Image (cartoon, helix red, strand yellow):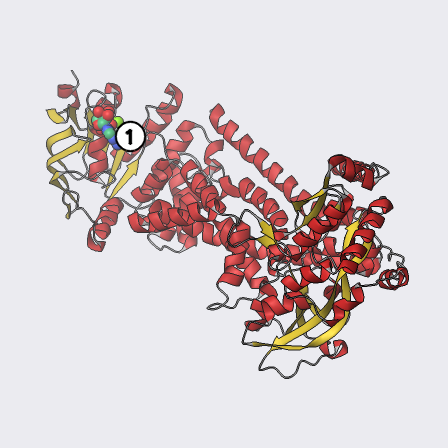
Amino acid sequence: MIGCRAVLVAVVVAIVALLACDGAAPASGLARVRAAGVLRWGGDVQGGEPYVYGDPARPDRLIGFEVEIADAIAKQLGVRAEFVQNDWSNLVPSLERGSFDVAMNGLEVTESRVGRVRFTRPYYVFAARLMARADDASILPDLLALRGKKVGTLANSFAFEMLRGAAEPVVYEGVEEPYVDLVHGRTDAVLLDDIIASRYGAPREELRVVGDLSEGYYALAVRPSEPDLAAAIDGAIDALAASGELRRILDRSRLWNARQERLVGWSAADQTTMIGAPPAPPPLGTAHVTLFLRGAGVTLVVSVLAMALAMTLGLLLALGRLYGGPVLARLAGAYVEVYRGTPVLLQLYLLYYGLAPVLRLGALPAAVIGLGMNYAAYEAEVYRAGIQAVPAAQLESALALGMTTRLALRRVVLPQALRHAIPNVTNDFIALLKDSSLVSVITVVELTKQMTITAVDVRSWVGPGLLCAGLYFAMSYPLGAVARRLEKKLEGEREEEAAR
Amino acid sequence: MIVVDDVKKTFASRLVLDGVSVRFERGQVASLVGPSGGGKSTLLRCINGLERFDSGRVEVAGLVLGPRQPRPDAAERATLRAIRLKAGMVFQHYGLFAHMSAIANVMEAPIHVRKIAPHEARERAEQLLDRVGLSHRRDALPRELSGGEQQRVAIARALAMDPEALLLDEPTSALDPERKAEVVDVLRDLAKAGATMILVTHEAAVAREIADRAICLREGRVVADGTPSEVLR
Ligand SMILES: Nc1ncnc2c1ncn2[C@@H]1O[C@H](COP(=O)(O)OP(=O)(O)O)[C@@H](O)[C@H]1O
Ligand SMILES: [Mg+2]
């Protein structure tokens, strides 16, 4: 219990220290940018064409309409622009902790973001575009008609906030995957910005555009503590819009349309309307706690089932490797090397998206199978070590009594090997419990994902972070205690034996 | 009833058994003696198939084992198991199943190999533990038993399969004198009861007391064969 409290205190101290750093930004952002001669802007190249992406002709060079806008704004400020790669879903927290001066990457002006960052005036007016399968007439261009439908979107996006409470949102981290899953029937529709829909959804023959449900704005996000930088960028965008430069840039990416005309002559009143009155963040309430508990439930279910698979498959692999004859041993060895030698994230991607054309797994089964097959490689090694720790004399005695090798393994070698393996298996289960947060890349909303969603909601990481950490801890601490107890017991037995 | 006929065995191109031929009769207690490294353990292990030989043949109660095949087939594996049921083995370091109590060790093979009903196997195991003087230790785990106790359980475990012969590889050499005596007592009783045994031992006194015959193995060859007093001069 003392250990438990000490860890919690450490977590709180770490979080408070992080928060303290946030407040330490210099007073004038503009002065800092000018002094450095560079405007550092954060974005994610994974968002792809046409935002920021590698030039196909020269992949080391970034192009895209946002690159051009950043360059043009920087020029207006008398500095140069520098791109900083950052995971899209964490652009706002990274901005807050000072990883770059501004964030710009299809960052929509949403209620929850307005409460955390200061938005400049917009550089693009987007539409939230609904797409469905071409042969599915049941999807209508009406948010209320989506009730009960599974609708793909990006986590914490404008569309996600629209869908919450109206449909069953399925959250993705990339822009290609929602449409892939829609084609494969894993979802009923996809709601995303028109740019994404026209580049990644519309080209697919199997899909159709249902309609636009709403409009919104892309703007640069600046830290609220640096209003002078925001004002300078407002001025720069104003100048770019007035001179026609903004239109030329958007035209080059075939993005100019009637909606964009609003950007010219954008007034202070327009800005106020766009931002609206920042709503008070909802407090972390029982509704959130319920969601967290559900997330913890998903984490636990995925982990337990994945571990069951890992233990079974791992045992078969270990047996194959030790007793399976040359061919099976080679195959089992290759399995272990491949699964341990490649990232589990990649394995999840391949299993869920890569195999989708031939094997359409649901997100939860894919999560269990993906994690289970990965951990099987580790369990196989744990069991192999356990089996090798059983003295050869045990197997010989069993054979000398007329047992078949199979019976001797089952009755004599494995029960002892598994005992040796228990502490390591338990430790691996704790590791798996935490690694299970990776399955959010294939749309499973488990504990960590729930935490990031809630953190955006309540505009703070402290409460959700502590709650999330506390739940993980509550799940892993008892297991850790069991593992330590077993380890001590086995250690004691070994010493007892050695003492003879 | 056990015939070893011109058996040759090499380990990594080293000749360990160099054409050994010897017959062991039913009801006879033979002791295998000779210098360390002479091939005694290897010969025992060849008789019950834990080690395969390169040429020659071994016959145990009518079952014939030939030299090692590149790929043993099902029939050969069945012969191996049948031979192991006829010739029980007791190892120098006991080899009790570490996760099972004394009585579970004794019952294990009768239940799972001979398919004897568990209650019958238990009854018989209790008799055997009584016979080696350990009925009070039946629920102890191997690590809770002394070496002498472990070896007596191992003997009871081998006897539980009703073998026609017992192969014992230095059953007393890991024990201190007191424990040694406990095991020798058990072996003497078995010998008196007419058991067929092949006993590898370094101890002339034990061989003289228990065995009818002594065979000396040196550098893989039988160099002497006669009564213990003849061979162990
Ligand atoms: N598994 C093995 N691999 C290689 N050499 C072995 C093996 N077992 C025994 N030997 C060698 O065979 C010879 C005979 O050994 P062993 O039969 O144990 O002799 P003994 O029991 O008479 O002391 C020794 O030289 C030993 O080193
Ligand atoms: Mg030996």
Residue A343 in percent (x, y) is at 52, 48
Q: Residue furthest bottom?
A: A137
Instruction: Give the residue displayed 29% in from the left and 47% down from the top.
Output: A326
Is A139 in front, or is B196?
A139
Is B207 in front, or is A165?
A165
Q: Give the amino acid type for the residue marked by disc 1 in the picture.
A: Arg
Q: Is residue A364 above or below residue B11?
A: below
Quadrant where the image shows the C terminus of chain B: top left
Tally of marks = 1
- Left or right, B183 with reference to A426: left
Residue A383 in percent (x, y) is at 46, 44
Instruction: Give the residue displayed 50% in from the left and 41% down from the top.
Output: A421
Using the rendered view, name the quadrant where residue A489 is placed: top right
Q: Quadrant holding ligand 1?
A: top left
- Left or right, A334 with reference to A242: left
Q: Is residue A495 above or below residue B48?
A: above
How packed mark 1 is, by other alpha carbons closer than 10 Å (few <14, some 14-19, many 20 or more), is: some
Instruction: Give the residue displayed 18% in from the left and 35% down from the top.
Output: B28
Residue at the disc numbered 1: B188
Mark 1, secondary structure of its residue: helix
- Whether the residue carrying mark 1 lies under 8 Å from ligand 2 is answered with no
